[in-house]
Amino acid sequence: MDPYIGSGTTAVAAKLLGHKYIGIDRSDAYMEMASTRLDNAPSEMSKIREEQGLHFVKGTFKDRKTQGKHVGKYRTKDDDIEIIQPSLLER
């Protein structure tokens, strides 16, 4: 539920993830913009998959730190990185 839907980003994300959503706004212009974005949401799926391909980490911050691995800004390209194929969005 988004009480200030604005351009509809939260509703679009919910729709693409297969969740129900409710958006409220007192501005007719924002409601129209959100409605248009929701209609065009499926076209944003390729952007989401591309973005997800850039982010992948194996293990939590705490686990990596406990194991003595570099974390945060000191982590190197080879420190505990594994490609994870997200299946959640493959609907």
Image (cartoon, helix red, strand yellow):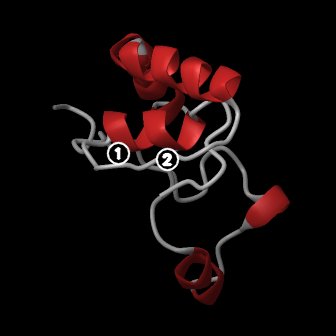
- Is residue 13 positioned above or below 45 on the image? below
Graded by Cα atoms within 10 Å as few (under 14), some (14 to 19) or many (20 or more), the crowding at tag 1 reads: few
Q: Residue at x 64, y 26 (%)?
A: 28
Q: Position of residue 11 (x, y in %)?
A: 46, 40
Identity of the amino acid at label 2?
Phe
Q: Quadrant of residue 30?
A: top right
Q: Residue at x 60, y 48 (%)?
A: 78
Q: Residue at x 22, y 42 (%)?
A: 87
Camera-nearest residue between 39 and 82: 39
Q: Position of residue 4 (x, y in %)?
A: 66, 49
Camera-nearest residue between 34 and 44: 34
- Is residue 48 positioned above or below 4 on the image? above
Residues at marks 1 and 2 touching, judged by CB atoms closer than 8 Å: yes
Residue 56's disc number:
2
Camera-nearest residue between 68 and 17: 17
The answer to whether residue 46 shows anywhere in this view is no
According to the image, label 1 marks what residue? Answer: 84
Rounded to the nearest whole Å, what is the CA distance between mark 1 and mark 2?
6 Å
